[in-house]
Image (cartoon, rainbow, N blue to C red):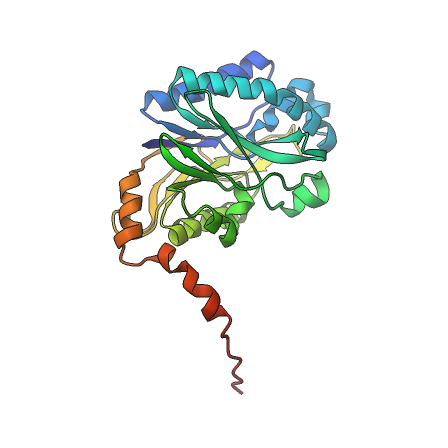
Amino acid sequence: MKVATAAYPSEYLSSWQDYARKIEDWVSSAAGQGAELLVFPEYAAMELSTLSGRDISLDLKACIDAVSSRMPDADSLHSDLASKYNVHILSASAPVFDDNFPDLPVNRASLFTPTGAVGVQDKQIMTRFEREDWGVQSGGPLRLFDTSLGRIGVLICYDSEYPLLGRALSDAEVILVPSVTEALAGYWRVRIGAMARSLENQCVTVMSSVVGTADWSEVIDESVGQGGVFGPPDTGFPPTGVMAEGGLNKPGWTYAEIDPAAVEHVRRDGVVLNRQHWDEQPARAQKVSATRLR
């Protein structure tokens, strides 16, 4: 498959039509390059809050309500575009209210297929900002999506920094990592996490980022990042593990070809077999011997 991962600038919108036109422009551009899987970033949907005005978009509580109320329409748009352009789309995540989580919002990304099927993935572990300042909570469980492109998992930003979450998706050939980070250090934390999950699971990870400034938001006011596609530095993959990367803070798509057969081969007969040997860790980790050296 060919994947397109976004370095996406969220913008102040004048109308719903501007948003719909923008998303279709991005989708049609990637589809025109032959991409079959499109990955938008975490919280890029916050631009929908601007449709309710600047005062709302700058208010941490009000912007959640504004975005959540727009998500049914945004989902319908992405579903229609996935069908129209015959692509799979991981839409930008958004804070949404759900009947299963009535008190606080969850951070949710949705995967749309050309056939009209849709799966949702909620963020598992909240950052300090989400839990201490914004009141966003952990949502539903991790899911493994069995698609016509192969098995796909999603680790939203901070989730990619946790090995056990990655291991829970070890049957995925591809793990998507939509992100938003306000500083270069944050971008590298997520990128290192994405590359580590690729190494451990001997799979491909695909990282998308919000980029640019948004003086209309307290959530994504400064965003640093780029698109990137990473594989295990082993048989059939680049020695650096970097399959493709965009320019830092440069808006646009980054493309890469992903061969599921290459994932299967490296898992079966790589120079190392990290995924197979994972289960040797617990027994060894219990045998730590404290040795005093003075």
Comparing 116 with 216, the one in front is 116
Is any atom of residue 220 visible in this view? Answer: no
Q: Quadrant of the C terminus?
A: bottom right
Residue at 58%, 17% in the rendered image: 73
Image location (x, y in percent) of residue 230: 37, 44
Q: Quadrant of residue 1?
A: top left
Comparing 2 with 217, the one in front is 2
- Tell me: residue 3, above or below residue 21: below
Q: Exactly how many numbered labels are in the figure?
A: 0
Comparing 29 with 84, the one in front is 84
Image location (x, y in percent) of residue 71: 60, 23
Image location (x, y in percent) of residue 18: 54, 14
Comparing 149 with 92, the one in front is 149
The reply, left or right, for residue 165 in relation to residue 95 is left
- Tell me: residue 7, above or below residue 276: above
Residue at 39%, 29% in the rendered image: 37
- Tell me: residue 208, above or below residue 160: above
The reply, left or right, for residue 152 in relation to residue 158 is left
The reply, left or right, for residue 99 in relation to residue 212 is right
Image location (x, y in percent) of residue 17: 55, 12
